[in-house]
Image (tube, coloured by chain):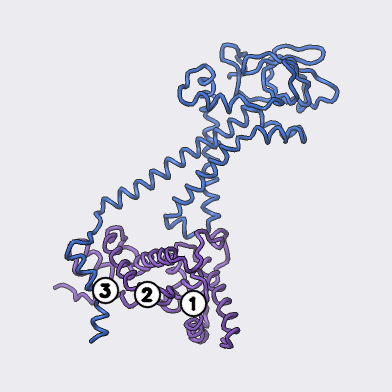
Amino acid sequence: MNSDSQKSSISDKVLKQIEKDQVKMRPKIYFILKALLIMSGIFIIALFALYLVSFIVFALRASGAWYLSGFGFQGIRASIVLIPWLLIFVALLLIVTLEALVKRFSFSYRQPILYSVLGIIIFVFLGSFAICKTGLHPNLFQKAREGRLPVAEEFYRGYGMGKFHNVHRGVVSELRDNGFSIKTCRDEILLVIVTPETLFLFESNVEMHDMVIILGERDDHIIIALGVRKINDKIGLLPKKHMPPRLYK
Amino acid sequence: MSQPTNELTDEEIVSMIRSGETDSFGILVERYEAKMKRYARKFLFGYEDTEDLIQQVFVKAYVNIRSFDTTRKFSSWLYRIAHNEFINAIRKKKKEPLSFFDPDTLFPRLVAKENADKETKEQELSQAIDKCLNKVDPKYREPLVLYYFEELSYKEIANILHIPVSTVGIRMLRAKKILKSFCQKINYHL
């Protein structure tokens, strides 16, 4: 008898709580809203991750870090300084958060973490690649430079214009015997001195209106070039009215 | 004519509860009370308040019953609630180590299949498990309990613990190794 009463004790206690309305069933709408909240969270974080990773690619290209790998040790050193580490850290945090949210769904937790993380990374990279193709960031950067981007102006200017003294990007504005001049996105004219040690990462000669990346220490407005690379990139160009039309096509 | 309640499936009873027959929840409690008690007794060591924990499991099941997908198995859903409740209890007491991250879930692995020679070997094993279970970490103890005492399949265990089936296999293998070495220490032969 004692065992019988013990057996039913939990059942009785739970049913009593239900009868007295001490515990109530949560309505269906609660679970629908909760699921919607999680889905929206995933959607918003995924969008933000896409934006951020595409912005990192933009910042790498705009600052010149994207093009420095051929310049040997000096180039790698300059790249490390120019890489937006903070943004990369935030992007990684977003990927970890996405993984944690996606892990709530059975299609994800039934698989090893590697698969879902790889899936998220592939999604973020392909999406970012697509965003890079749209020209969203160069357009916003252009607006920021013209003072027409109120909220993100400093963000775009800070990351888009580069900050390392040894890497310079600009359009060839004058050819000289000992080198050439470039016009940077800050509207500065810099004289690039070419020496026998200067490494050229292209076949043809430097021509007027070429977009170039210069690796070399700057002294006032003069750069002794360690390396020169011609690039075909529309990011960080001068204001449209100053640019030769072919670079904007 | 309505079906006798003992012939109804768990999922049919859930549908009845959702449509207002809240008393039917008692049938589910009675069906699973003994199982939950055994699960708690084997998985939690040195916990005096297991009755309260089990009561809490059923209360949570009732509160969240509208989130249960009736196309799935009620038992797996209930075991999942119990698992969460027991893990929280272990974390609160801080008696045993429990990590938030399990490296075994990281990479794909070959599934260690459920043994074909189950019948003969596993009777001996469950005796050993009974003797030495408290010496195994909760991470390895739980799949052992669910497999040997609750008689759930690897797939069901994976659904309850929210881990891949291959990870269940890995944990079972490791748990058996730990048990074996401990049994050798106390001269209990497997």
Q: Nearer the viewer, mark 2 or mark 1?
A: 2
- Badge 3 element: helix
Residues at marks 2 and 1 on the same chain: yes
Q: Determine which residue is flagged by label 1.
A: B134
Q: Residue at x 72, y 35 (%)?
A: A77
User: Which kind of residue does numbered mark 1 sit on?
Assistant: Asn
**Which of the labelled discs sits on residue A10, or is there none?**
3
How far apart marks 2 and 3 lie (CA) works out to 15 Å
Q: Give the crowd class for mark 1: few <14, some 14-19, many >=20 residues within 10 Å.
A: some
Q: Residue at x 75, y 25 (%)?
A: A216
What is the quadrant of residue A11 in the picture? bottom left
Q: Chain of mark 2?
A: B
Give the chain coloured blue: A
Q: Earlier in the sequence, mark 2 or mark 1?
A: 2
Q: Nearer the viewer, mark 2 or mark 3?
A: 2
From the top left corner, tell me how far across and down residue A81 is, in percent.
67, 33
Q: Nearer the viewer, residue A233 or A15?
A: A15
From the top left corner, tell me how far across and down residue B74 is, in percent.
32, 67
Residue furthest left as drawn: B1
